[in-house]
Image (spheres, rainbow, N blue to C red):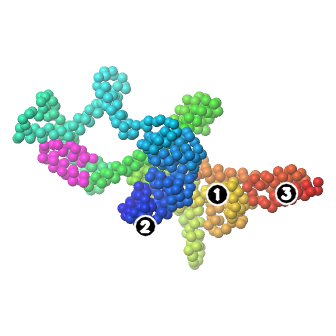
Amino acid sequence: AALFSQAAEKGHADAICNLGVCYDNGSGVDKDEEKAIALYSQAAEKGNTRAIFILAVCYDNGSGVDKDEEKATALYSQAAEKGDARANFILALCYKNGEGVDKDKSKAIEYFTKAADLGNEDAMNGLKTMGIAYTPCKTISEANEEEKEEAEEEVAGTENQGEADNHEESEGDKETSYIEVSCLVKSCTSDVDLLNMEDSFFPSSSPLFPDEEQGKKETQTRYLADALLQLLDRRGTEATICNNPSEEEELENAIANLFTVAAGMTSIEEDTHDRVQSAIDTLSHQLPELKKQSKQRQAALKAMRQMIEKGKKERQVALEAVREMVVKGNIERVGGHRKVGEGSEAEEQMEDSNPPALVRASVLSKLLQPECVDSPSCVRILRNIRERVSQSISKMKADMNKVDEISQRERQREPNREFDSAAYLIMISKAYAEKSKVVLPHLLNMSHQLDIDLLHLSGSDLDLLFDMGEMSTLKSEYERSLDLIRRCRSHIELKKNGEEAVAVRSSSGLASLLSGHVPSGMDNRPANVTLFATASHFARLRSSSACSAWYSSMTEAWSWLECKHSEWKDLEARSDHVLSHVDDVGELGRVANELKASGMEVHDRVAALVEKATSLMLDE
């Protein structure tokens, strides 16, 4: 548990998950289910498949959390997408039995099949119970082995081909490279020189090489290894001695040592073995760094490949939708910028489209994780991003400094004022709110420049990207504002009760919200005043950027609230008119029903309409 804890502090997802298991089972630590759930959730956010699956099981069984079948199913889906066989099998059962989802036989078969392909034997039985006989696809190792055999057969077949078209020339190049590498490997691993030396002292009863021609070839096999050693020796002589080599130079030196060991291990030259020993000694210090770099590169590659595959799948789904629309004759525009006359043009646009801003943000977020951030790929990508938006970053920092200067001047105006902790926190909160206002246009502009949804990144990711420690706090301002607007919309749609809901569910309360003020009836504390003002500012900000999912969600929810407010004002005007000038019982009832369905908290107005309608009916 102690080792897992140390690795978890460095952000390693596997270690965080394993530490959660320790707390879950009480292994090496006191049993703490709440702590275990928190660690599983943390590892799951980092994309750890095992943690996602365990968390799904917890919600499924109500272990350490409230039982929630829908959330469990969503987590099983995430784990299944990452290739977890158990998650695919459980999802199949969910769709088969309608647990947490609607029953869906086709989806059950789909997930049983995926689980079976991933080696889950129970999935085969599941398919049998549904009357389906299925043979799983080859495992990855089997597929790779078959691919390798096919490639070797192709190379062997190419030896007998005499045609000189471009494709065959390419295959010939591959064959040549394959043969050259094979010869180099054979040269480095050949013990022929040592065998001949041994035989000169202690002759064997039978010749080393019965075939004289083969013997001649074997005695010449060391020439490639010796040539490689000479090349490495020349490199070492020409290389400039540097006390502080760069990371790239250190990698080159480590690989040169690996080659030295490989090429010199079977040599019979003493000087060469001195070099091999020296290389091995150096490698003993270089190997941990090599291993670290290899893991970083692997993590970076995995992150990019996963998102590439995800993007391909999403584009394929979109492409199928385009094809269907073309067949039905319903498509006029694709991508929002030009008409499409034929399906092939639409498909070509979809296939040639670049990864969307959200996908790039997801890739960047993965690259900014501890296991990837120091990789050469991440270093190059960050350098490129910062160079592309260097002017915007400078302007953003300048605007943030201006906010600090204004805050400083305000404090200097009241030098004798004593700030208690509450007053100090209010002052800091206002300063961050102002900073979030000046930073948002820059983030949206840079998102547009880079075609990366920067607001999709976490606060810590933004801190790393811009090398600034305040971005996490600013990101929380954006999240809190969007949460407020969404929450107010939900209050209206679901006709909720409670202090905040009732305050918003009136024409005057909604008007206050839209003007950036706290609605009457709500707590008017400074934090709420600041939150409502900043949320209104963000929502009314006009930007040409179409790259931000946050901005789209914010403006869409705000537009909905504006439309709802306009609808309510019209409805109130109609109800006032009906109460004052209309004696039609049917019209009074219709308006009363519209008021009830509108989401407004208008019991008094409805009661007045009902009372008037009742009075008219009694008079009749």
Q: Residue at x 72, y 59 (%)?
A: 505
- Disc 1 and disc 3 in contact, CB within 8 angstroms: no
In the image, what residue type sits under mark 1? Arg
State the extent of the magenta-drawn residues as a range: 255-284
Q: Nearer the viewer, residue 253 or 307?
A: 307
Relative horizontal placement of residue 566, taking residue 580 as reference (left or right): left
Q: CA distance from mark 1 to mark 3?
A: 31 Å
- Residue 458 can be seen, yes or no: no
Mark 3 surroundings within 10 Å by alpha-carbon count, few (fewer than 14), some (14 through 19), many (20 or more): some
Q: Which mark is residue 30?
A: 2
Q: CA distance from mark 1 to mark 2?
A: 38 Å
Q: Which mark is residue 610?
A: 3
Magenta stretch: helix, strand or loop mostly: helix
Q: Position of residue 181 (x, y in %)?
A: 26, 36
Q: Which mark is residue 487?
A: 1
In the image, is residue 227 above or below residue 511?
above
